[in-house]
Image (tube, helix red, strand yellow):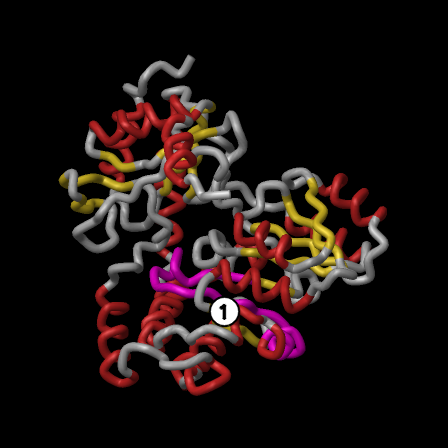
Amino acid sequence: MSFDLDAGLAARRAAGLYRQRRIAHTPQAPARRFDEGGRLTFCSNDYLGLANHPALIEALADGARRWGVGAGASHLLAGHTAAHHALEEELAAAVGRPRALLFSTGYMANVGVLGALLDRDAAVFSDRLNHASLIDAARLSRAAVRVYGHGDVADLDAQLAAESAGRRLVITDGVFSMDGDLAPLPALAWLARRRDAWLMVDDAHGFGVLGPAGAGSVAQAGLGLDDVPVLMGTLGKALGTFGAFVAGSEALIETLIQHARSYIYTTALPPALAEATCVALRLMQSEGWRRDRVAALIARFREGAAALDLPLLESATPIQPLVAGSTERALAWSAHLDSHGIVVPAVRPPTVPDGTARLRIVLTAAHEEAEVDRLLNSLAALPPRA
């Protein structure tokens, strides 16, 4: 059988699901220049506005002068430097756990953790709206995969009660990346302990934004190591750099070093990037005004959206989903904003469930109030929603 790739691509185009990239010619910021010209963007995960911060740029340059560019090897060969180690220690302290381990991406962290902890005799319980990296990690782990309703603790309880597997892991986003809502972490933690399971939280979109000093959704919920034995966070969103980490007990981190294939068999992050991330982490902790600013912009946007009767999902995070329903309507809304010089890409199936295509509007500390008002003025003239 031959691979008819052209037919598959044509079908995707016809369904309105074809993905295309914009080419940016300026650094990460709300106002950017693309091939099409200048645009105001509301689609970046640079929640604290740190990706183009002068202190991070300086730290990266200084780190490159000290360490060179590439790490040159995996952490277990010759790639683990004092810069990596210092960052791991600072990340562990930031989330209140004994140890942390760096991964190249959040995707690799999730795949590595589940692959190291689970096998064919285990079971993993995944929220229906978890990020693709958790979904794929569960599938690749070889464990039995059980999917519970989004945030549905009763459904999860029933599935845990019926499962006979010895090793059981509940996995959830802390903040759901397409809906912006929070997982019911206290209830999940209580249930996991009651059912003799572990809870793992992917806090990619909560770390840096929520909790005391930006420690994340788990800290905001008042949960500790015993409640959430496995915590994953990313560095390329609120911290504005790149990479990910897993934090937990001494035994967990040592187990991952021994068994997580996506950690063992890949080149370490550039050490200069670790230097820059340490600076970003300190800014995250010391400059609480950034979180305050994001919260104020969220309130301003939601108030304006309510006045316009826009179909926003409930979200107290920077992720503000505006549900269009059909793929065609979401594309039309995105094109309308683009015609007003604003970039908010349409998010379509399979990234979100059928019938829930949307604009994923994201607010950051780098946005101005006038820019939020400009967005609202453009949304006021959206094509018909009926």
User: Residue 117, image x and y in percent?
Assistant: 68, 67
Residue 269 drawn above or below residue 308? below
Image: magenta residue range: 232-256
Q: Quadrant of residue 48?
A: bottom left
Q: Type of residue at label 1?
A: Ala
Identify which residue, 130 or 118, lies in the foreground.
118
Q: Is residue 383 visible?
A: yes
Residue 170, image x and y in percent? 69, 54
Front-lying residue, 252 or 21: 21
User: Looking at this view, is 163 or 181 the one in front?
Assistant: 163
Q: Give the total number of marks visible in the rendering.
A: 1
Where in the figure is residue 237, as x and y percent of width and height? 39, 56
Please identify the quadrant where the C terminus is shown. top left
Vertical arrangement, residue 361 with respect to residue 323, above or below: below
Depth check: give the residue in front, 159 or 182.
159
Residue furthest to the front:
1
Q: Is residue 187 magenta?
A: no
Q: Is residue 212 visible?
A: no
In percent of the image, x 40 and y 16: which residue is there? 385
Residue 145, given in percent of the width and then of the height, sits at 70, 50
Residue 344: quarter of image: top left
Residue topped by disc 1: 94
Answer few, some or many: residues within 10 Å of disc 1's Cα (few below 14, many 20 plus, some between 14 and 19).
Answer: many
Q: Is residue 366 left or right of residue 238?
A: left
